[in-house]
Amino acid sequence: MKRREVHLAAARGFELGAQTYARGRPDFPQALDSWLCDSLQLGAGRTVLDLGAGTGKMTRLLVQTGADVIAAEPVDSMRAILVRDLPAVRTLRASAQNLPLADASLDAVVCAQAFHWFATREALAEIRRVLKPGGVLGLVWNIRDESVDWVAQLTRIMAPHEGDAPRYYNGEWRTAFPAEGFGELRERVFPHSHVGSAEQVIVDRVASVSFIAALDAETRERVLDEVRALIATTPALAGRDPVAMPYLTRVYWTRAVPF
């Protein structure tokens, strides 16, 4: 696999921060069960690829549908956690631009917290190649709810360090659509939250962001100290255990259509 297929911030940040990612990132709301089964039509006898599977947070939900699940993750330390926790799942070291799968072999491809890293015509063409006619591409993001003031302040702490790392927030991933071989892009939103200690669901969440994890140790600790100071001065957070990080889970899906 060519290194250029994985953005440097993702390659370095996720390689260094895989354990923090597993702790600090939320799972996905159970409300996604019906979306996976109804909109993506997953179930027994169907085959789905979890593309950019990370540590396997979405993979678990896909397995629960009864579908045959394949997970693809290019970052070794992330994939190692997935293999450890979900040993029965077929796992590939592969990127979105180069999938070692046969043409028209999948009923669905799901990208959770990942598509913004590879939202290109090249990647979409490869996804379309492996989908059966009528197959579905599903995109999922847990998005921090910045209508809450302290959550918006977290983003302001992180923003100076993001560099050219692709983000869901800037919307650039949307420019990949409409895409050849795919139909209309549909959307739904589900409320969600991550409940736990402030150190886990806020500090580890910030530390798990690729471009924060990729910082030198001194700068990274300075950022996390700012986060801890925010927690200590926010009445809704200071001294509270557990706390809840509010999210909106945004899902999108589109069907493979004839060329």
Image (spheres, rainbow, N blue to C red):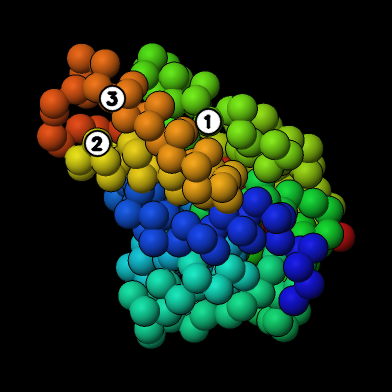
The percent coordinates of residue 147 (x first, y second) are: 42, 17
Q: Are marks 3 and 2 in contact (CB under 8 Å)?
A: yes
Mark 2: which amino acid? Ala
Closer to the N terminus: mark 1 or mark 3? Answer: 1
Q: In this rendering, is residue 154 above or below 168?
A: above
Label 2: which residue?
A: 198
Q: Is residue 192 in view from this perspective?
A: no
Label 1: which residue?
A: 158
The percent coordinates of residue 18 (x first, y second) are: 45, 61
Mark 1: which amino acid? Met
| Apparent side of residue 200 relative to residue 151 in the rendered image (left or right) | left
Element type where label 2 sits in the image: helix
Q: Which mark is residue 96?
A: none
The percent coordinates of residue 185 (x first, y second) are: 66, 42
Residue appearing at x 52%, y 53% in the figure: 112
Quarter in which the N terminus is drawn: bottom right
> Quick one: 33 or 169, which is closer to the camera?
169
Residue appearing at x 24%, y 22% in the figure: 232
Q: Residues within 10 Å of mark 3 (few under 14, many from 20)?
A: many
Quote the CA–CA distance across marks 1 and 3: 15 Å
Q: Residues within 10 Å of mark 1 (few under 14, many from 20)?
A: some
Mark 3: which amino acid? Ile
Residue 148 figure quarter: top left
Q: Residues within 10 Å of mark 2 (few under 14, many from 20)?
A: many
Residue appearing at x 32%, y 54% in the figure: 23
Quote the CA–CA distance across marks 2 and 1: 17 Å
Residue 238 figure quarter: top left
Q: Is residue 201 in view from this perspective?
A: yes
Q: Which mark is residue 231?
A: 3
Quarter in which the C terminus is drawn: bottom right
Quote the CA–CA distance across marks 3 and 2: 8 Å
